[in-house]
Image (cartoon, rainbow, N blue to C red):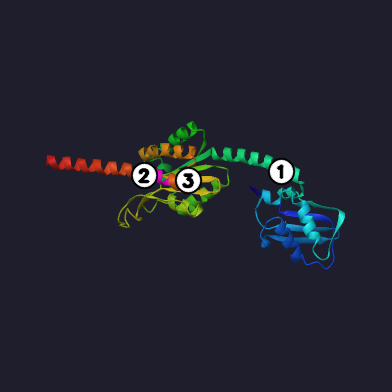
Amino acid sequence: MELNLLDKTTFWIDDVELDGTDLGDLAAAAASVLRLPREEVMVVDVRPGLVAFDVVRPQVDAESIAGKAAALLARLSSIPGVTLGPAAAIHSEGVLGLIALDPPQAARALEATRSIAADVREQVARRAIVFASGSEVRDGKIRDTNSPYLAEVLGRAGHKVEFGGILEDDLGAVIARLEDVLGRGFGLVVTTGGVGAEDKDFNVEAIQRVAPGAHTPWILKFERDMRRHHKEGVRIAVGRVGPTLLVALPGPNDEVRATTEVLVSGLSRRAPDADLAEALAAVLRSRWQEKMTLHGGERDRHRGNL
């Protein structure tokens, strides 16, 4: 279970004296006991009766550090030049204070932390934010029917939904908006629009930037003409950053309606991200096939009337 150190990365030992001790050996011993990489632990202060260590990482595995005081003191006392007094103890003002707990206390603290973490994860998973896209929505030329629909359906499924606003037709601006919401405790981020082949469509690319490895299946492909089609075709995106799932859906309302139930179903059964992406894409491909078949039939009927 990973815990964020929240910038409180220091722990110290008091009632300890050093005499010609190699500080590298001290740091290596502490890293070994706490199961941290050697280069991520360093000695940052030595004073009479005190030695302070710093952990150079934002998170630690709780199980690796909890209740390790006795083991850590024993290991340090075996290093040449280290003398521990009878009151030697480990202290920290933050998460690293787990080191100082005795094994029964550590077990209770870990169980309580797991319970709290599970509650927080569940609350985060139920928080959603939806975005519309495009200057045509921003300028009021077309009405945003997608965001209200998503909010209604996701709300019925138990999500607490916020409207994030309208994303600009600019890659840097979209990336900035997505990076901002990643730090605000949302489990689901959904964008609509901005997934086409025009030079103003950037939502898929933005998700790829903030969530490397995002799944971006094609819906349809065509030749680039560098006029309307600046890209190979239309894709959607499903990516993940920590507990946050990011989904880029198309803009047409009928396509949003066709994919939202698939999205809700996938979330409820915790479908793998790749499977969810393909399920969404399959629905959209099917709709495009229907549209092309229908339009082809209409053209044939028109020719018959000529």
The residue where tag 2 is placed is 282
Number of other residues with Cα within 10 Å of mark 1, as a class: few under 14, some 14 to 19, many 20 or more = some
Give the distance between the C-alpha atoms of the residues marked 1 and 2, in whole angstroms: 47 Å
The residue where tag 1 is placed is 107
Marks 3,2: beta carbons within 8 A: no
In which quarter of the view is residue 51 placed?
bottom right
Which numbered disc, 1 or 2, marks the residue that appears first in the sequence? 1
Q: Which mark is residue 272?
A: 3
Q: Bounds of the magenta span? A: 277-281
In which quarter of the view is residue 304 placed?
top left
- Residue at x 76% of width, y 54% of height: 71
| Foreground label between 1 and 2 | 1
- Residue at x 77% of width, y 65% of height: 23
**The disc labelled 3 sits on which kind of residue?**
Pro
Query: Residue 78 appears at what percent x and percent y?
Result: 80, 62
Q: Is residue 278 magenta?
A: yes
**The disc labelled 2 sits on which kind of residue?**
Ala
